[in-house]
Amino acid sequence: MKKIWMGAVLAGSLTLGGCGGDKPAETAKTEATAPAGGAAATPDEANGGTITGKVAFAGEKPKMATLDMSANPACERAHKGSPQKSEEVVVNENGTLKYTFVWVKSGLPADKQWAVPAGTTSLDQNGCMYKPRVIGLMTGQNFEIKNSDPTNHNIHPQPTVNTDWNESQSPGQAPMTKSFGRQEVMIPVKCNVHPWMRAYIGVVGHPFFAVTGDDGTFTIKGLPPGTYVIQSWHEKYGPMEQTVTVGAKESKTVEFSYKS
Amino acid sequence: MHLNSVGSLWLRRYAMFVACCTFGLVIAGGLVTSNDAALSVPDWPLSWGRLVPTLEGGIRYEFAHRVAAMLVGLLTVGLALAVGTEKPLPDGRGSDGTTHLHAEPRPSGSGSWLAWAAVAVVLAQAALGGVAVRFVTPAWATIAHAALGQLFFAILVAICVGLYAGYGGGWAAPTVVCTVALFSQTILGACVRYGVMTPVAHIVGALFATMLVMWAGLNILLQNLENPRLRRPALVLLSITFSQVFLGIGSYMARIVYAGAPQPMPVLVLFTVAHVAVGSLAVGAAVALAMLARPNAFRVHGGTGCRRTPGGRSTGCCCCIPSWAPA
Ligand code: HEM
Ligand SMILES: [Cu+2]
């Protein structure tokens, strides 16, 4: 664990040296920081505040383009019968928006160090698509990149605050483990072998974030009592913010509403 | 027979061949960027750790570009060696025996210099390509790579034209200004392409470049209506530049139409590749016109220009490109 932290700090300071200047407000602040000797905090789910909500979508569902995968027969075969549509906008059955990243943008105690969430987050390349399209990570949190396809992929995140990299992953190659050292909302990821492949990674300096799924809801648990700016971020419709105050053991609901 | 040795005829053909291959390489490079395929091969100099990777998706473009670049590199070294060893007959006589006035002692001397410069550029290109791959396409490296690519093609055009018209002599300023303007315009284009500049700079640049081309081109054209050696290249430069403006407008419109597309769209790819390729041709045409418009052009082979032998065959420089021979 210690090693990961040190790596994260190193990566963080490297990028800091490499790219000073103006950064977007939401990315500039937090850096992966090792807890100074003491243990890092974990969200107190029993006593903390909870923010739940959904990301609603109003208006006509945009028609997504069908992806042309003919450049790579293996990809095309994976979608035989039902060609893959672009996942830029996915409106769920219940009129909510999938793949929206929701996170606590500000309001957390500045000096508090948070432990990396348990469990493995993974980004799979399957059917020449990233599964899922949007993931959230804490700074320094490892995640796994897998290739379930019988074809070659390169993984190329395009961060502005973190360090750039681009690596290949052949069929059957072992998953690779990666992490990002600095807060950045969002990092686009793409594959240049299959230029339609696109994912977004939200990297946040604390564990209070979520990504909407098939029901368009999100839950952020274990917040210390306080007033928070909650931001939702969608790749096409951009960010939205709301301010919420939660007390201990209190639960509040927030709804974001995007329009076509 | 032609003005120089037979070897020099072959040298010209070979130089033309290398220039044509280079044009193909420019197109291959345009295909890589417009298909966003540059990083589909994440390693260098090997490709996916192998000599030949699986040719699928974007890898096809990137690998084809690497192979074409290597071939052109080798051909260019060959050209430098060939131009360097080329020697005219000692007293400036062509192999047809006629004495050529004002012959330089070694007309290909500057050609050799240019050819080695081309070798240097091709090596720099390989290094920049490597930097782009290893350091994940820093904008400066990709823009430099695009600019040097254009410069490389321009040098090859200069070598080819020089093999016909000689290298020495003064320059006609307007044609040089045109060349510089068009070359700068390709750099601005690359800056737009890689997102470090707004298209406005490139569009304003196009306005300037087109005006300069019209000024120099029309001047030369109108003053040389009877002289195909200048009339034709001037016409070529003018028409290529105009085509380029239309292709530019086409690329711009395609960019707007396909702004939200989830992947590179064929029409957009077509327009941008054509725009990059014809951009190269415009710079090349400007270089050619600049070289042909020199007061000393063709003097190497005898300043008198074309002559006809009693048998009706033309001799002298202009017959190297048969259609250039005046009636
Ligand atoms: C007159 C001479 C012109 C020259 C020599 C020229 C040259 C170039 C070159 C070389 C590039 C690509 C660089 C690279 O990718 O490496 C480029 C890109 C571009 N040019 Fe031009 N250009 C000219 C005029 C115009 C005009 C009139 C317009 C539009 C109104 C235009 C619009 C564009 C656009 C939009 C791009 C970016 C294409 C893309 O990647 O999507 N150009 N130009
Ligand atoms: Cu891929």
Image (cartoon, helix red, strand yellow):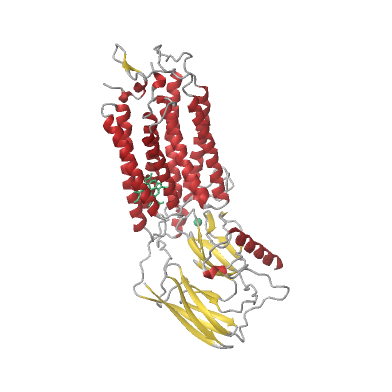
Q: List x then y, in percent, for residue B280.
A: 40, 40
The residue drawn where x is 49% and y is 21% is B86
How many marks the image carries: the answer is 0
Q: Is residue B224 above or below residue A217?
A: above
Q: List x then y, in percent, for residue A58.
A: 37, 76
Q: List x then y, in percent, for residue A255.
A: 45, 81
Locate the C terminus of chain A by quadrant: bottom left
Locate the N terminus of chain A by quadrant: bottom right
Task: Looking at the picture, tell me which residue is in the foreground, A121 or A164.
Answer: A164
Q: Residue B316: which quarter of the image?
A: top left
Q: Is residue B325 above or below residue B43?
A: above
Q: Is residue A216 left or right of residue A109?
A: left
Q: Is residue A49 above or below residue A258?
A: below
The residue drawn where x is 32% and y is 29% is B230
Answer whether residue B35 is visible to the viewer in this image: no
Q: Residue A106: which quarter of the image?
A: bottom right
Q: List x then y, in percent, for residue B183.
A: 42, 42
